[in-house]
Image (tube, rainbow, N blue to C red):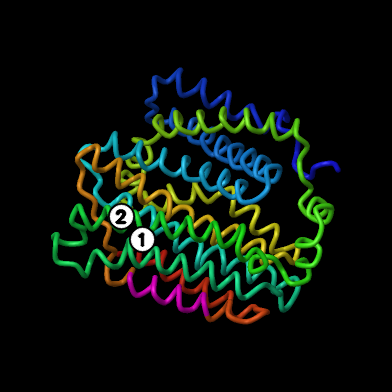
């Protein structure tokens, strides 16, 4: 069966990575001033190419390994961006990990999920989905976000919003363990939770039906995509190192609060998933949108927190993970509202609009703390 994925050797699959590698090496891994703008554009294109190739490989190898491939690719992109800023920042940016993780959660739970619901409702009035899977996704996001972002403000072993070393190591391990359990549940134990009801019979009964729905790539396409994925990730890592200083400098030059830097990094990481999730929502595939959006948030927290905690320990940098009281209120409101919006079998315009209102309020707090 032919694949619905475009061929890995199309120009938009390899050219951004090749140009990105060349630009990173030509600038000596440091781009400032106006030179940073074209390099930044190449970074965005390389991120898009990397995620596309990861999705192609994931569609070929199937579950549970497909989910792992995509999650690892997205995590490498985020870690490359955040770690590059951490390494080059002087003085150290102790809140960058917190700001990025928090931005990913809020962008996904309120912004992306709300927009997917609104678009699906405008076109299909009352879009359906699998409530078992949707609430499971949100419960994992809520637990991870609470452990990593809210709990640090309520312990006494370290000052401010910091964990003591044993606490941060334990929380990082808990997030990683919860991600592993989630992958097991999503891909092996309870696959039906994450498949729309109308597709379950086809998807769970025959391999032919699976290929009919997913458009599984051929072995040759998957092999080529694997090579292009490695090339794209190499380009992302080097380009992240190249433009990392410029991101912080641009935020400061614009007179914006430091937390905006984390929002920019999170937006770059989520860019490819956002486009795919919105297309699925418009096609009345809201469950696919939720799987992609909320699954990205789970992978981001579950995998990035342990790695970035290790990077901070290696650099000897402190980490301030606790969010502000205003952010805490909005995060809790976002999780509760999301669970209520996705607790039934259908949703509507009002529920998506409520999430977007919370998203707008969060952006206000970010820009005007």
Report the side of 329 relative to 46 (left or right).
left
Position in image of residue 341 (x %, y %) = 56, 79
For mark 1, give the secondary structure.
helix
In this view, the residue in front, 170 or 144, is: 170
Numbered disc 2: secondary structure: loop
Q: Which of 206/54 is in front?
A: 206
Q: Quadrant of the N terminus?
A: top right
Whether residue 350 is situated above or below residue 69 in the rendered picture: below
Q: Name the residue under label 2.
A: 257
Please report the residue visible at 37 percent of the width from the left and 29 percent of the height from the top: 32
Q: Is residue 308 magenta?
A: no
Residue 289: name its quadrant.
Answer: bottom right
Left or right, 11 with respect to 338, comes to right
Residue at 42% from the left image edge and 64% from the top image edge: 363
Residue 194 is situated, as x and y percent measured from the top left of the image, at 64, 65
Magenta span: 328-339
| Residue for point 74% across, 72% down | 197
- Tell me which residue sits at (41%, 57%) in the image: 177
Residue 70 image label: none
Q: In this view, does 239 lie to the left or right of 70?
A: left
Quadrant in which the C terminus is drawn: bottom left
Which residue is denoted by mark 1 in the rendering?
Answer: 367
Q: In this view, does 328 lie above or below 296?
A: below
């Amino acid at each position: 069966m032919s694949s619905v994925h475009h061929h890995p050797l199309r120009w938009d699959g390899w050219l951004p990575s090749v140009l990105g590698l060349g630009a990173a090496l030509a600038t000596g891994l440091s781009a400032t001033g106006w030179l940073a703008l074209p390099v930044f554009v190449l970074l965005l294109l390389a991120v898009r190419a990397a995620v596309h190739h990861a999705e192609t490989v994931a569609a070929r190898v199937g579950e549970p390994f497909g989910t792992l491939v995509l999650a690892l690719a997205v995590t490498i992109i985020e870690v490359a961006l955040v770690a590059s800023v951490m390494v080059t920042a002087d003085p150290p940016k102790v809140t960058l990990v917190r700001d990025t993780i928090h931005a990913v959660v809020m962008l996904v739970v309120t912004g992306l999920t709300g927009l997917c619901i609104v678009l699906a409702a405008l076109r299909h009035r009352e879009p359906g989905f699998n409530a078992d899977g949707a609430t499971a996704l949100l419960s994992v996001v809520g637990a991870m976000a609470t452990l990593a972002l809210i709990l640090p403000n309520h312990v006494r072993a370290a000052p401010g919003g910091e964990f003591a070393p044993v606490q941060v190591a334990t929380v990082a391990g808990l997030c990683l363990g919860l991600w592993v359990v989630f992958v097991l549940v999503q891909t092996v134990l309870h696959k039906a939770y994450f498949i729309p009801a109308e597709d379950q019979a086809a998807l769970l009964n025959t391999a032919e039906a699976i290929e009919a729905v997913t458009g599984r790539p051929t072995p040759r396409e998957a092999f080529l995509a694997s090579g292009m994925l490695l090339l794209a990730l190499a380009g992302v890592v080097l380009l992240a190192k190249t433009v990392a200083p410029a991101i912080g400098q641009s935020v400061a030059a614009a007179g914006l609060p430091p937390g905006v830097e984390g929002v920019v990094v999170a937006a770059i990481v989520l860019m490819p998933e956002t486009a795919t999730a919105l297309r699925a929502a418009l096609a009345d595939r809201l469950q696919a949108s939720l799987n992609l959006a909320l699954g990205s948030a789970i992978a981001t927290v579950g995998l990035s927190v342990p790695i970035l905690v290790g990077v901070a320990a290696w650099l000897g940098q402190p980490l301030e993970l606790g969010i502000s009281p205003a952010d805490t209120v909005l995060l809790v409101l976002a999780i509760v509202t999301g669970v209520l919006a996705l607790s039934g079998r259908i949703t509507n315009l009002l529920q998506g609009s409520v999430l977007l209102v919370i998203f707008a309020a969060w952006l206000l707090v970010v820009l005007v703390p």
